[in-house]
């Protein structure tokens, strides 16, 4: 059994909502939709058989029907793609790292296609916590910086610029990242 450091325990405990009950301000989902307020915390990994595609203009960086989505209370799902379905020759590992109290240490990636370089447009967990070992090395991309698709729908970025959620028409919120959502 791994001992969880105190600061991680404290970070995990600060969240007011954990998916057991929708808050009064949550939007009621219509048929075929899901509420981000029904997603659990800690997050879960869900296989998704739909085609997930990421591109820069017309250059397809990735296309896969073996992606998974990570779903967490109040956030838009984040799609992670196995590296064998990514044009890894177009990715350059960044020096940037961040810490997620649920998933572990995040590694960032730049995309370089011909003379165009986009900085920190993707991330992965190269050193995940044991609960997220199954997505070790899988990569997600920021839909605010690249064109990302689930099926034929182009996704919208999660509000606020920090989170990398993929907003589709099948989810309702409000979604974390909007003004006033810091404690969600």
Image (tube, grey):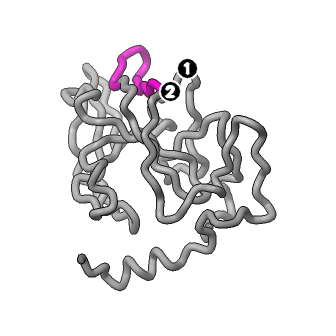
Which quadrant is the C terminus positioned in?
bottom right
In the image, is 7 to the left or to the right of 87? right
Dot 2 corresponds to which residue?
Answer: 149
Secondary structure found at label 2: strand
Which mark identifies residue 124?
none
In the image, is 60 to the left or to the right of 168? left
Quarter of the figure with residue 115: top left
- Whether residues under marks 1 and 2 lie with C-beta atoms below 8 angstroms apart, the answer is yes
Look at the image and say whether residue 51 sits in the magenta stretch: yes
The span from disc 1 to disc 2 (Cα, nearest Å) is 6 Å
Dot 1 corresponds to which residue?
Answer: 152
Front residue of 89/135: it is: 135
Q: Position of residue 169 (x, y in %)?
A: 67, 34
Magenta segment: 50-62
Q: Few, some or many C-alpha atoms within 10 Å of disc 1 (few <14, some 14-19, many ≥20)? A: few
Front residue of 161/87: it is: 87
Q: Position of residue 16 (x, y in %)?
A: 62, 74
Residue drawn at x 35%, y 34% as measured from the top left = 118
Q: Few, some or many C-alpha atoms within 10 Å of disc 2 (few <14, some 14-19, many ≥20)? A: many
Residue 22 in the image: above or below residue 116:
below
Q: Position of residue 49 (x, y in %)?
A: 45, 30
Secondary structure found at label 1: loop
């Amino acid at each position: 059994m791994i001992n969880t450091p105190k600061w991680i325990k404290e970070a995990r405990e600060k969240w007011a909502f954990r998916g057991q009950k929708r808050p009064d301000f949550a939007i009621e989902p219509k048929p075929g939709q899901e509420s981000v307020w029904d997603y659990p915390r800690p997050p879960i990994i869900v296989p998704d058989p739909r085609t997930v595609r990421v591109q820069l203009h017309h250059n397809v960086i990735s296309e896969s029907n073996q992606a998974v989505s990570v779903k967490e209370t109040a956030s838009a799902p984040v799609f992670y793609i196995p590296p064998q379905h990514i044009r890894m020759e177009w990715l350059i590992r960044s020096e940037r790292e961040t810490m997620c109290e649920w998933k572990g240490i995040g590694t960032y990636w730049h995309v370089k296609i011909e003379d165009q370089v986009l900085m920190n447009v993707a991330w992965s967990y190269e050193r995940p916590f044991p609960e997220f070992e199954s997505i070790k090395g899988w990569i997600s991309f920021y839909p605010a910086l690249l064109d990302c698709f689930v099926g034929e729908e182009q996704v919208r970025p999660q509000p606020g610029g920090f989170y990398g959620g993929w907003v589709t028409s099948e989810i309702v919120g409000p979604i974390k990242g909007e003004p006033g959502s810091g404690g969600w």
